[in-house]
Image: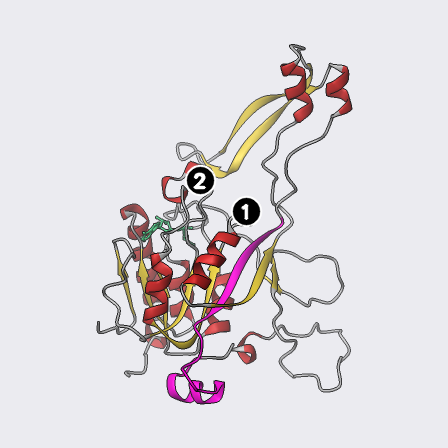
Amino acid sequence: MKLEKYKIFNKSCYGLQEIKNNSIDALITDPPYGISYQGNYWDKDLPNKGIWKNSFNVLKSGSFGLIFSSIRLMHHLMVDLEDSGFLIKDVLFWSYLNGMPKSRDIALDIDKELNVKSKIVGTYNYVQGYKKNSANNYYTANVKYKKEPKSELGKKYRGCGLSLKPAYEPIILIQKPVGKNLTVAQNVIKYGVGVLNIENTRIPFANDETEIGHNPHPKGRVPSNIIRTQYHCDGYDKFFLVPKVRQNAEDFNSHPTLKPIELMEHLVKLISFENQIILDPFSGSCSTGVASLKNRRKFIGYELDNKYYEICKKRMENIERELLSQLKFEVV
Ligand SMILES: C[S@@+](CC[C@H](N)C(=O)[O-])C[C@H]1O[C@@H](n2cnc3c(N)ncnc32)[C@H](O)[C@@H]1O
């Protein structure tokens, strides 16, 4: 396939038939998590593990990959990745403070089980996620009752629940092993991949921070495996900071699991170099693609759902127009 800047396919990624073996420099993808997030049909199951073998085949030796995952099913995904030949190198945490636990008040369930009517002590407005009501642009709120347990056993278990507040999303860092009998340096010379792009993703020191370490790097700290959405009140900023995005931040983009471009840019810069090709088999609305073009990387994406594919196309055309003069890739 001749690739000038990018190519997005509106079809299933399974097989990756359009891509030549050993031609891709990095894999960055946010696949279905297999948890039926917000009831989305495409999130019912983890991807068929064949896609990871396909990805392994099209990647160059030594290439890195970053795969978003869910806390509950990341172990399955990691086994699938390992079974496909990848090395598991790390798990990055994108941590945030505003996650909400999907739990329930067991004390009220106990009342119900015992046929005791729980006490109504007030009402509150319940807002579902970030979803906008498209008709009037307001967030939809339902009025719900505040209740307290009434039975003695219910009172004993008051406030007990089933899950912790989710405060991070794991991103699995994988690598296709370097070529047979090659050192890392020999692999880089031969394929242009095999190392993390630390230099390009350093975390700058704070303005008022005194120099630390015996030989401080002018560009700042080595990027850590924690990325976060807001300050954690720790004085100096040792982590890359990237806030979450609201769904519909761009009014034409309704993808329910939209990732921030800034986060994707950090990941793109971490595991690839200019002019290289990034693959995202589960593109959604193409956040990986936009981040790739913004950082002068070429992009190949697949998106099965026609509605999301159209959003993808529009976002890529917009960013291409915006970056018109800067987007001249080396022809290799
Ligand atoms: C978690 S979303 C990716 C969202 C993306 N990170 C963004 O910022 O827009 C995963 C996407 O994979 C797509 N998908 C699921 N199975 C697929 C398949 N076999 N081939 C291609 N796309 C698929 C879904 O339609 C969904 O849009």
Disc 2: residue Cβ within 8 A of ligand 1's nearest atom: no
The verdict on residue 175 being magenta is: yes
In the rendered image, the quadrant that contains the N terminus is bottom left
In the rendered image, the quadrant that contains the C terminus is bottom left
Residue at image mark 1: 72
Residue at image mark 2: 36
* Residue 146 visible in the picture: no
Mark 2 or mark 1: name the one nearer the start of the chain: 2
Q: Position of residue 201 (x, y in %)?
A: 55, 74
- Picture colour scheme: secondary structure
Q: Position of residue 103 (x, y in %)?
A: 61, 33
**Region of the chain picked out in magenta, as a range:** 167-193
User: Vertical placement of 133 versus 145: above or below?
Assistant: below
How far is disc 2 from disc 1 in space, using C-alphas? Answer: 12 Å
Seen at 48% across and 34% down, the residue is 138
Residues packed near mark 1 inside 10 Å, few (<14), some (14 to 19) or many (20 plus):
few
| Left or right of 163 on screen, residue 34 | left
